[in-house]
Amino acid sequence: MKYSYFPGCSLERNASAYHVSAMAIAEPLGMEFVEVEDWNCCGATEYVSLNLTASYALIARNLAQAAKETSTKQLVAPCSACYLNLKKCDAYMEESPSLEEKINLALAAGGLSYKGGTLKVRHLLDVVVNDVGYDAIAAKVTRPLKGLRVAPYYGCMIVRPKLGENGTFDNPEYPTTLDKLLKVLGATVIDFPLKAHCCGGHMTQISESTGFELIRRLIKGATDYKADLIVTLCPMCQLNLDAFQGAMNSHFNTNYHMPVLYFTQMIGLAFGMDAASLGIGTELVDARDALSKIGVEVPEAELVVKKPPKEALPMPSLPEEK
Amino acid sequence: MSSVSVSPTQEGSRQKTFLEEVIENTPGDCHLLNCIQCGTCGGSCPSGQDMDHTPRAIFAMISAGLKKEVLKSNTPWYCVSCYYCTVRCPQSVHITDIMYTLKRLAVKERVYDDSKAPDFSKTFIDWVENYGRAFELGLMSMHMIKHNPFGVFKMAGMGMGMISKGRMAFTPTRIKGMDSLKAILNKAKELEAMA
């Protein structure tokens, strides 16, 4: 099946492992992705906190760009925040003619237009489990994740809120699609009670004690259930749980070690792909011990430091900065 | 709740109530009038313990017209957008969307007590408005310099880790259609100011 693909800013760099692994499993799963041309940031949870019309116009530019691709009406986002923003903008434009009119007045200034409901916005997990399907995935498994205890972690924005008539593709309180997928891959899936709880989003930057506590709960929960690793489907969740795990440990004087990988990486591993080709090794919390249980070797973490280009120093400044 | 009049204002015969202002500034039908003060929202909130007032209390304060107290409180800025309250609300109040509305109104009136969260949003969006994409290194460093200079030492390990794993870009990416995007956003801001 063919899909428009909206990678989002995180997947360009900090979550490039998610992008790389999604592309690696696309072909064996029969998915064809066409990247939205010259897409822009979705505004995350920040723009809508400042300016409603501008935040929706920012998102709508992406919808308009994606709608130019005539061969598919399906728009796929791997990031939960991008997914919700795109879906919400589309749904509210369809629901509210006055909002749709306003957004189109703004889009017209850039030579674009979009009609709410034109595209169907979907999360990558939805497409993988519902379009490809568990059976087709099971048929491709050559290296079952046997003996690996995984905590399936959905976070918030993939399952909440319910929007439009069809609501969400999984239960907002107790989702199970990722659980089923990981079982199909051969893993031992723990019944993770915190699976749809919040990772804290940007709170590490606003209030450390609030942000770190939300991270601690999830890491402690998975540790208490003796999980070898957490499997996620959102770059923000991965960043919080993986990259901030060390800072969280220092904050609480704890010593947790819980690797966090993407579901696309788990699919790739079960299909027999090698770890490096799936971006494994770029996580900050080492996953090697966990993956050795299924006989996967992760190449020694090599330093991939590229010297920053000269123009990067000093910090680039904003043209309009006063 | 029943004592609050929400009938359309007649030719500007009276000022809009704060309740009307909040509803008007929230996209779609936010069902705020249907709030029954049950408190399911506060009980579901992962950051509720750090808020000045729980969402339930905030909604009562909005109905009572306590605009300044509501917009000064940290409540909307501590909302983590998890939408648990929204899906659990028995009256389908779009609670998370209303929190965004309160943030916008607080920014507009410049009445928030702590500028850390609004500044974070502004710095994030500065990069987007000028490049079309988010830029993590620029955002994090500018935000820390302003609000948490000593945090640099605390986060140094993480920053070095991200750089050594190739997960941190040193320069922002600029989209090709920047002129078109700027025109769109400028027009949108004009429309927002008119509302």
Image: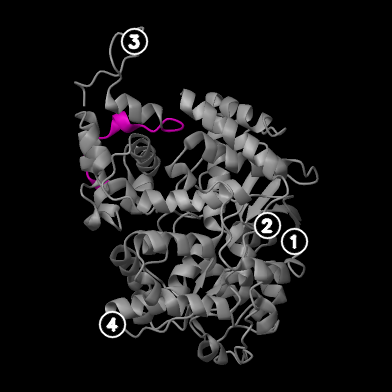
Q: Pinpoint residue A281: horizontal percent, then vertical percent.
A: 59, 83
Q: What is the chain identity of the residue bearing mark 3?
A: B
Disc 2 to disc 1: CB gap under 8 Å: yes
Q: Is residue B176 magenta?
A: no
**Residue named by callout 3:** B12
Tag 1, which secondary structure?
loop
At label 1, the amino acid type is Met
Residue appearing at x 33%, y 34% in the figure: B109
At label 4, the amino acid type is Asn
**Residue named by callout 4:** A253
Point out the frontmost of discs 1 and 4. Answer: 4
Residue appearing at x 24%, y 52% in the figure: B51
Residue A109 vertical position relative to residue A218 in the rendered view, above or below: above
Mark 3 is surrounded, within 10 Å at the Cα level, by few (under 14), some (14 to 19) or many (20 or more) other residues, namely few
Residue A97, picture quadrant: top right
Distance (Cα) linking label 3 and label 2:
54 Å
Tell me the magenta residue range.
B26-40
Tag 2, which secondary structure?
helix
At label 3, the amino acid type is Gly
Disc 3 to disc 2: CB gap under 8 Å: no
**Residue named by callout 1:** A31
Distance (Cα) linking label 1 and label 4:
45 Å
Distance (Cα) linking label 4 and label 2:
45 Å
Point out the frontmost of discs 3 and 1. Answer: 3
Q: Is residue B37 magenta?
A: yes
Residue A233, picture quadrant: bottom right
Q: Which of B42/A224 is in front?
A: B42
Q: Identify the disc placed on residue A131.
A: 2
